[in-house]
Amino acid sequence: MKKRLQPHIMCGIGDVAKYVLLSGDPNRIERIAGFFDKSLKVGDYRGFVTYSGRYRNIGVSASSTGIGCASAAIALEELARLGAETFIRVGTTGSLQRDINVGDLVIATGAARDEGPTSYVPAGYPSIADFKVTSALTEAARDSKKKIHLGLVLTTDAFYGEEENLRRWSKLNILSVEMECSTIFALAGLKKLRAGAILAVDSKPLMGLQKGEFEPGQKTGELNDSVQRAIDEEIRISLEAVKILEDRHKKE
């Protein structure tokens, strides 16, 4: 009998582990898989790239979600149909606070929903990270040399939105802005799954350090060396969090 494939991620039953690291950028998925003990590409279609393998003898996958909540919802829906249960977003974010700098890491405890795709849940439905996943990320980051910030982020579907909107959220003590967390958290909650997020700070839009145009060869935004090191560190932390979660599960 032929394997039935999901229409966008092009993976079937058996291709995806219960732990999945999510990243918007499909090119980052191969980078994440490079931290696995062994890995295999199991899907590559319409920008959705998926690798599966083992990390410290634990089954784990990495899958791209594309840019924004609508694309992230498709990825999570189809991964969940294949048995994925725990999701960790490994992404980038723009700081909205003066004390959060480029190259720092943010562990999101929840996301303000300033976007449209989670409209299939009521407006008051919270987008909250799973406590156990957040706890595992925090524990895994304990020895990190990177500065770690824990708190709420803003999810927006308007990358080139009004700066005044960001200032409003900054005054409400939102740590940073990104484009996928709210849907990942809300959808995981709706489906009784678990989700968390760790984000590398690549810009400070309210301080004139936007992720904007640059000359070829310039290392700005995500290409900044400190951001690249932060991305490697968040990958390491995420995989260690998977190990912590699995160890806790075995003790339950």
Image: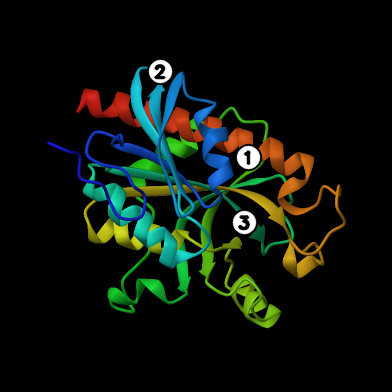
Could you tell me which secondary element the residue under label 3 belongs to? strand
Earlier sequence position, callout 3 versus callout 1: 3
Most foreground residue, 126 or 88: 88
Could you tell me which secondary element the residue under label 1 belongs to? helix
- Density class for disc 2 (Cα within 10 Å; few <14, some 14-19, many ≥20) is few
Query: Does residue 185 appear in the picture of this structure?
Result: no
* Label drawn at residue 93: 3
Q: Which residue is mark 1?
A: 231
Q: Are marks 1 and 2 in contact (CB under 8 Å)?
A: no
Q: Is residue 227 found left or right of 135 in the rendered image?
A: right
Q: Which residue is mark 2?
A: 56
Q: Work out whether 219 lies above or below 19.
A: below
Earlier sequence position, callout 1 versus callout 2: 2
Most foreground residue, 3 or 166: 3
Q: Is residue 67 found left or right of 216 in the rendered image?
A: left
Most foreground residue, 38 or 90: 38
Instruction: Identify the residue at the far left of this view.
Output: 1
Residue 67 at what x, y percent from top left?
A: 53, 61
The C terminus - image quarter:
top left
Q: CA distance from mark 1 to mark 2?
A: 20 Å
Type of amino acid under label 1: Ile
Residue 246 at what x, y percent from top left?
A: 31, 27
Residue 218 at what x, y percent from top left?
A: 86, 49
Most foreground residue, 106 or 200: 200
Query: Does residue 105 appear in the picture of this structure?
Result: yes
Q: Is residue 156 found left or right of 96 in the rendered image?
A: left
